[in-house]
Image (cartoon, rainbow, N blue to C red):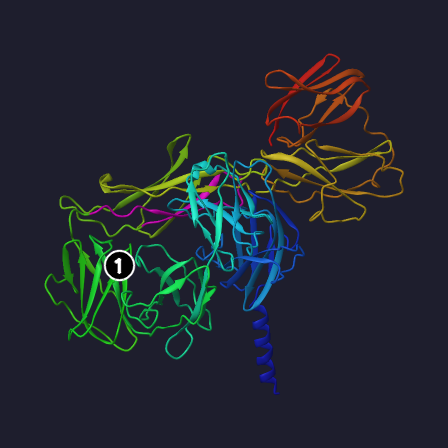
């Protein structure tokens, strides 16, 4: 091999090896992340800039952190593209083609062991994590799945999601059934604000030959809902192959129509053909037409029928396990496509395409936005459009036959459009919220609101100048009223983005707290004011506290006392103390040795043991953000002088943690010997616990309080020591 060929091979090897997923983490780690349902779930995928990752979420049934196809359960398959908000799953949050896909949303996944697999260029990496149950759900939905004896009732995914318009955020709550088919969906946040909710057996899972009934059920959620049950019945597998006449056809859409009512609506039962042209789906008992379609191809009904009136029927019953070889052949054709509007607004209309020699006529109807595509044989055609009681002909003619449209082979004639002027100019469609996302690297209470505008060109209303969008206003739902939250001038863009304030901040103590928004478009002279469907989003404080400074240490007898400066962060929650016998240790992945709201910690009995201990301090805020670790201090840096005597003054500390469930710690300092009484009261002034009632010497004291037998609520703890009496409040949240 000569040098140039060798160099070429090396370049190819390097390029192939780099064009792959290089790292996958969930909540910052590849293995062992533990996430409470309702808190923030995030993953990060490193891959070539602009690349697409093919992702799969598995339930790790045998809990060995490795995908075992025969045992574990595949539930979600979706893709993500670096730099794109749009995909068949969650988008890339940063919207930048920077080689990293960042995703974060509320962890609505069912409590279980999970494995997240990301693949690019046929190279995959995985990260394992655990979703744990939330302790205090805002609402619950429970029920039972029943079915034939062969049905495995364990690990069936039941989901609840808002059954309303709009919505760009991933809002859902999941549960997995136990071996008896029982499930309970725990819901966090403010679910009643998103009513109604739809509960269903997820279509993302393989249910074998069984079909759930009812397919779903919708209701308003508030509190506890029981008896939301599903019955599985045995279905029939319909399978076959779709070709283009010579080769298997990937991406075709074989689907069912009810033979008794072929066009009743709904998406029926369907599959998408694989690279070999094969498909399979399960249908309940009934009579079915099978329809084979794909864009730019002539559709076909089974068995080689051109329309549903002639189509053969597939009979499915519980006694028939499968119907095989339901094959289809669809042929690539030419296409005529365009859009039908009324005053520039997309409308549903009928389209007729007729050969100029009258030998062939094709019919179609437009979608909601007015677009259509008709597959035809090569030739010359006239195109006419019917809307309400009017007919017009391409191009803009009111009398037949119109202009000729010619297509050859498998080509496409585009922009074969029509614009009606029927009735008064209709109002344009309202703006549509695309998504509501947290503003990164801030202290919370702010979100990005992105919306899409469907406004046509300025409308001529007869008198005066044309009417167009002048501005957009953002509104927030606040205590039963829509409250103004911001305004954006129109720049004639299709997509807008603005930062809006939320009502709440999401924290680890209160979970994800959602705020509802809508956007209104204001036309000239307020001729139209059009409001978008409502959508919800949450904010998250993701700016870490400052690094604790002023770290020092001194011996106090056999104890070592570590001190540091008080945090200046407004959302400070507590300090974490880390200890190691290794110098320059890292705190990542370590559990705190101690946690405190004070700026001092006493490590008892470590002086004189012959072991040197090293300490670092971090600060946490209420959103769970952790500061970088402080400078290191060691127990060997001081002598044995007694620099810390008894406290100089009486002090009652705030309990930690607060809110708490079910236990918390109360600390206090005594500057002199006193008879101490420490009691807990409810808001009615009733005594619920006596924690201390005895004579005590000067010093620092810590007492634990367990509220497991008490209801959620506000409590007061009161200390009396000599002439000192002080009260503090604490919250028990279950």
**What residue is rendered at 37% in x and 75% in y?**
244
Note whether 439 is above or below 357 in the view shown: above
Task: Please report the bounds of the magenta region as a residue range.
Answer: 426-453
- Is any atom of residue 81 visible in this view? no
Q: Position of residue 213 (x, y in %)?
A: 45, 50
Residue sticking out furthest to the top: 723
Q: Position of residue 617 (x, y in %)?
A: 71, 40
Note whether 338 is above or below 604 in the view shown: below
Q: Regarding mark 1 in the picture, which secondary structure is present there?
A: loop
Q: Position of residue 422 (x, y in %)?
A: 15, 51
The residue that mark 1 highlights is: 366
Q: Does 451 lie within the magenta span? A: yes
Q: Is residue 632 left or right of residue 275?
A: right
> Which quadrant would the C terminus be assigned to in this image?
top right
Q: Is residue 375 left or right of residue 561?
A: left
> Which quadrant would the N terminus be assigned to in this image?
bottom right
Residue sticking out furthest to the bottom: 1
The residue nearer to you, when weighing 244 against 177, is: 177
Note whether 137 is above or below 338 in the view shown: above
Q: Position of residue 225 (x, y in %)?
A: 49, 37
The residue nearer to you, when weighing 69 against 390, is: 69
Q: Classify residue 593 by image quadrant.
A: top right
The residue nearer to you, when weighing 629 against 413, is: 413
**What residue is rendered at 29% in x and 65% in y?**
308
> Mark 1 packing: few (<14 Cα in 10 Å), some, or many (20+)?
many
């Amino acid at each position: 091999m000569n040098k140039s060929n060798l160099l070429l091979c090396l370049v190819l090897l390097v390029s192939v090896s780099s064009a792959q997923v290089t790292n996958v983490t969930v909540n910052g780690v590849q293995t062992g992340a533990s996430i409470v349902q309702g808190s923030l779930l995030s993953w990060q995928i490193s891959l070539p800039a602009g690349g697409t990752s093919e992702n799969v979420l598995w339930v790790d049934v045998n809990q060995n952190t490795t995908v075992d196809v025969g045992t574990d359960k595949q539930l979600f398959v979706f893709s993500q593209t670096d730099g794109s908000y749009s995909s068949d799953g969650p988008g890339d949050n940063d919207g930048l083609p920077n080689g990293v896909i960042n995703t974060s949303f509320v962890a609505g996944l069912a409590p279980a062991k999970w494995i997240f697999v990301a693949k690019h260029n046929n190279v995959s990496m995985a990260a394992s994590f655990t979703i744990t149950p939330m302790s205090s759900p805002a609402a619950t939905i429970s029920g039972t799945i029943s079915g034939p004896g062969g049905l495995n009732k364990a690990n069936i995914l039941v989901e609840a999601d808002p059954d309303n318009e709009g919505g760009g955020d991933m809002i859902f709550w999941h549960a997995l059934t136990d071996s008896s088919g029982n499930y309970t969906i725990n819901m966090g946040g403010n679910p009643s604000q998103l009513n109604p909710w739809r509960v269903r057996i997820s279509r993302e899972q393989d249910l074998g030959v069984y079909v759930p009934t009812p397919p779903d059920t919708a209701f308003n959620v508030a509190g506890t809902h029981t008896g939301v049950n599903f019955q599985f019945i045995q279905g029939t597998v319909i399978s076959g192959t779709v070709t283009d006449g010579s080769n298997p056809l990937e991406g075709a859409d074989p689907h069912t129509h009810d033979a008794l009512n072929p066009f009743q609506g709904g998406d029926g039962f369907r599959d998408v053909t694989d690279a070999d042209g094969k498909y399979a789906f399960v249908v309940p008992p009934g009579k079915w037409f099978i329809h084979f379609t794909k864009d730019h191809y002539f559709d076909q009904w089974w068995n080689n029928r051109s329309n549903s009136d002639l189509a053969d029927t597939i009979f499915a019953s519980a006694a028939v396990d499968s119907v095989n070889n339901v094959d289809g052949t669809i042929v690539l054709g030419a296409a005529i496509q365009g859009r039908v509007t009324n005053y520039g607004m997309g409308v549903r209309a009928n389209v007729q395409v007729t050969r100029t020699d009258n030998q062939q006529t094709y019919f179609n109807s437009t979608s909601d936005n007015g677009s259509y595509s008709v597959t035809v044989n090569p030739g010359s055609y006239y195109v006419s459009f019917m809307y309400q009681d009017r007919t017009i002909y391409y191009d803009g003619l009111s009398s037949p036959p119109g202009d000729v449209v010619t297509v050859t082979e498998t080509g496409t004639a585009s922009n074969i459009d029509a614009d009606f002027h029927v009735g008064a100019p209709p109002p344009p469609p309202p703006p549509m919220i695309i998504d509501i996302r947290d503003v990164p690297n801030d202290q919370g209470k702010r979100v990005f609101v992105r919306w899409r505008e469907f406004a046509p060109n300025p409308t001529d209303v007869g008198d005066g100048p044309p009417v167009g969008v002048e501005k957009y206003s953002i509104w927030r739902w606040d205590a039963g009223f829509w409250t103004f939250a911001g305004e954006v001038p129109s720049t004639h863009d299709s997509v807008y983005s603005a930062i809006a304030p939320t009502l709440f901040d999401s924290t680890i103590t209160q979970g994800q707290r959602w705020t509802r928004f809508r956007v209104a478009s204001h036309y000239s002279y307020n001729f139209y004011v059009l409001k978008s469907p409502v959508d919800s989003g949450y904010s998250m404080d993701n700016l870490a506290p400052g690094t604790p400074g002023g770290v020092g240490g001194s011996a106090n007898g056999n104890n070592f006392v570590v001190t540091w400066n008080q945090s200046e962060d407004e959302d400070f929650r507590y300090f974490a103390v880390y200890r190691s016998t290794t110098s320059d240790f890292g705190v990542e992945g370590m559990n705190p040795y101690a946690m405190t709201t004070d700026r001092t910690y006493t490590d008892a009995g470590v002086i004189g043991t012959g072991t040197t201990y090293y300490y670092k301090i971090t600060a946490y805020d209420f959103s769970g953000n952790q500061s970088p670790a402080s400078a290191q201090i060691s127990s060997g840096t001081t002598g044995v002088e007694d620099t810390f005597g008894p406290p100089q003054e009486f002090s009652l500390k705030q309990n930690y943690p607060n809110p708490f469930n079910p236990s918390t710690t109360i600390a206090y300092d005594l500057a002199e010997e006193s008879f101490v009484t420490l009691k807990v009261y409810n808001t009615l002034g009733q005594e619920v616990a006596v924690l201390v009632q005895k004579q005590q010497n000067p010093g620092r004291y810590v007492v634990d309080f367990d509220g497991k037998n008490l209801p959620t609520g506000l409590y007061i703890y009161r200390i009396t020591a000599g002439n000192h009496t002080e009260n503090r409040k604490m919250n028990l949240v279950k």
